[in-house]
Image (spheres, rainbow, N blue to C red):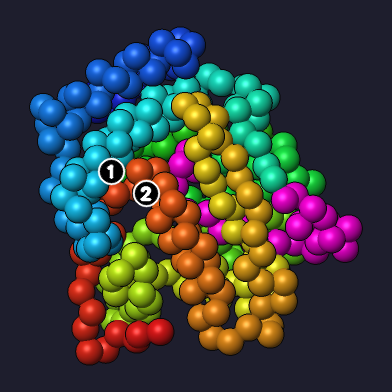
């Protein structure tokens, strides 16, 4: 009860912060950067090692600049996530543009549901709110619950206020089947580390052997829903764009792993262009390849 009470107090404080203009929150972000990077050295070695392994041909000076740029952006992402608590969907939509929407119009016209792949790149949190405002599909967003129930409930409600329906990861297939008669766009962010099971599937990603989730591909194959990638870009502070790119129009015709490899190829292209906006502080490569794993 005490922990829950403290969580509610903390959430109320964050909500009050979220009422401030983004310009003021970005001043706070500059201070957060100093705390994260200079004082706490938050996951600095994880970021540094990930960057070194991902970009072996960059100089130490280049890697250090990306590292600093990343922590600056991480601080921005924190205050932008706080802003979600009170910002209206229309406010966020005005800061988020979508290009190449004509790619998905044929699927809308045919009343064919789709799957959308995104990475933990740019502000993927805002995208969960604004996607329903940009497309005619009902948006289903796959997510992993936070351990703190108070914060999990608050941010779930914040994400759903634009019309999105949040779905727990374990219920993905069940919910997709339940909505099979609706026109849906199910959004997956599947670029983070899968749990270590008896065997993992590995691909080459950012110059490293990388274990990957196959959930999106399995669902694409079982439903034959077309797969689209949201190529996210940060336009400037507080503004983003998503360029829709086709991964597969007919998954039944794709070979095993084609969809997964294409999705990661598109994400890797974006990261190579602007590396600072990917989630480098995640322990993406904590698993090592073992004999019973499968390599693509």
Q: Residue placed at 36% from the left, 69% from the top?
A: 205
Residue at position x 69%, y 45% from top?
99
**Quarter containing the C terminus:** bottom left
Between 51 and 60, the one lying in front of the other is 60
Give the residue pinned by disc 1: 66
Left or right placement of residue 71 versus residue 133 in this view: left
Q: Position of residue 122 (x, y in %)?
A: 46, 42
* For the residues bearing labels 1 and 2, Cβ distance under 8 angstroms: yes
- Give the answer, above or below, for where 269 lies relative to 3: below
Residue 146 placement (x, y as % from top left): 37, 43
Depicted 18 relative to depicted 180: above or below: above
- Give coordinates of residue 18: x percent, y percent: 45, 16
Q: Secondary structure at mark 2?
A: helix
Q: Which residues are magenta?
A: 100-124
Instruction: Identify the residue position indicated by label 2 in the image.
Output: 275
Q: Which mark is residue 246?
A: none
User: Does the magenta portion include 235?
Assistant: no
Residue 123 part of the magenta segment: yes
Q: Answer few, some or many: residues within 10 Å of disc 1's Cα (few below 14, many 20 plus, some between 14 and 19).
A: some
Counting residues from the start of the chain, the first of labels 1 and 2 encountered is 1
């Amino acid at each position: 009860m005490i922990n829950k009470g403290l969580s509610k107090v903390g959430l109320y404080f964050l909500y009050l912060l979220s009422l401030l203009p983004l310009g003021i929150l970005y001043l706070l972000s500059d201070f957060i950067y100093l705390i994260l990077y200079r004082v706490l050295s938050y996951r600095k070695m994880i970021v540094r090692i990930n960057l070194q392994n991902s970009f072996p041909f960059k100089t130490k000076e280049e890697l250090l600049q990306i590292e600093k740029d990343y922590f600056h952006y991480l601080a921005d992402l924190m205050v932008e996530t706080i802003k979600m608590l009170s910002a209206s969907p229309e406010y966020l939509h005005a800061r988020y543009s979508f290009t190449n929407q004509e790619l998905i119009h044929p699927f809308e016209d045919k009343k064919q549901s789709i799957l959308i792949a995104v990475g933990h790149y740019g502000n993927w949190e805002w995208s969960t709110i604004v996607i329903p405002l940009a497309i005619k599909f009902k948006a289903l967003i796959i997510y992993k619950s936070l351990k703190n129930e108070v914060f999990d409930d608050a941010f779930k409600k914040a994400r759903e206020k634009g019309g999105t329906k949040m779905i727990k990861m374990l219920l993905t297939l069940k919910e997709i089947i339940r909505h099979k008669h609706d026109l849906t766009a199910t959004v997956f962010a599947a670029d983070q580390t899968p749990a270590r099971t008896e065997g993992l599937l590995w691909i080459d990603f950012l110059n490293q052997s990388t274990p990957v989730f196959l959930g999106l591909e399995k669902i694409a194959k079982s439903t034959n829903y077309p797969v689209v990638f949201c190529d996210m870009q940060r336009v400037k502070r507080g503004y983003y764009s998503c360029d829709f790119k086709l991964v597969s129009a007919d998954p039944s015709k794709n070979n095993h792993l084609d969809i997964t490899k294409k999705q990661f190829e598109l994400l890797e292209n974006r990261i190579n262009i602007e590396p600072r906006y990917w989630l480098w502080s995640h322990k993406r490569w904590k698993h090592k390849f073992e004999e019973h794993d499968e390599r693509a």
